[in-house]
Amino acid sequence: MAEVEFIYNGVKTIIQCKINDKMKDICQKFKEKAKINNNMNIFCSYDGKVGFNDELTFEEVANREDKRRNKMNIFIYDNQTVINNKDIVKSKNIICPECKENI
């Protein structure tokens, strides 16, 4: 069993899944649990990149460390948030989702 931790507006939501579950199904479970309208545009950030192929499975998307621990963290942004690939940088520190500073 694996789990995906979604962070949306500072709130963590954990979705349990199997490693062969498709990311689109995992994301759909998150939307249902977080009560996010399917018509709302949301953007996912994982491993320092915006977006991923949601037809791939957890195992195919997860990096080596996340496969080892069977857990991945995905940041969710809505269409109100301006996302620019230059603005998303992978950090070794914990970053505050509101002010974007090191905690």
Image (cartoon, rainbow, N blue to C red):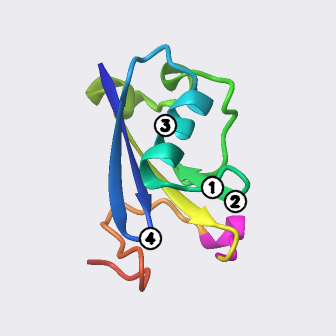
Residue, far bottom: 99
* Residue annotated with mark 1: 37
Q: Which label's residue is closer to the chain start, 3 or 2?
A: 3
Does the residue at mark 1 contact the one at mark 2 (Cβ under 8 Å)? yes
From the image, tell me which residue sits under label 4.
Answer: 9
| Residue type at numbered disc 1 | Asn
> What amino acid is labelled 2 in the image?
Met
Q: Earlier in the sequence, mark 2 or mark 4?
A: 4
Is 6 in front, or is 28? 28
Report the Cα–Cα distance between label 1 and label 2.
Answer: 5 Å
Whether the residues at callouts 3 and 4 have beta carbons within 8 Å, the answer is no
Disc marking residue 40: 2
- Residue 13 x/y as whole percent: 35, 51
Q: Is residue 100 magenta?
A: no
Residue at disc 1, secondary structure: loop
Tell me the magenta residue range.
81-87
Q: Secondary structure at mark 2?
A: loop
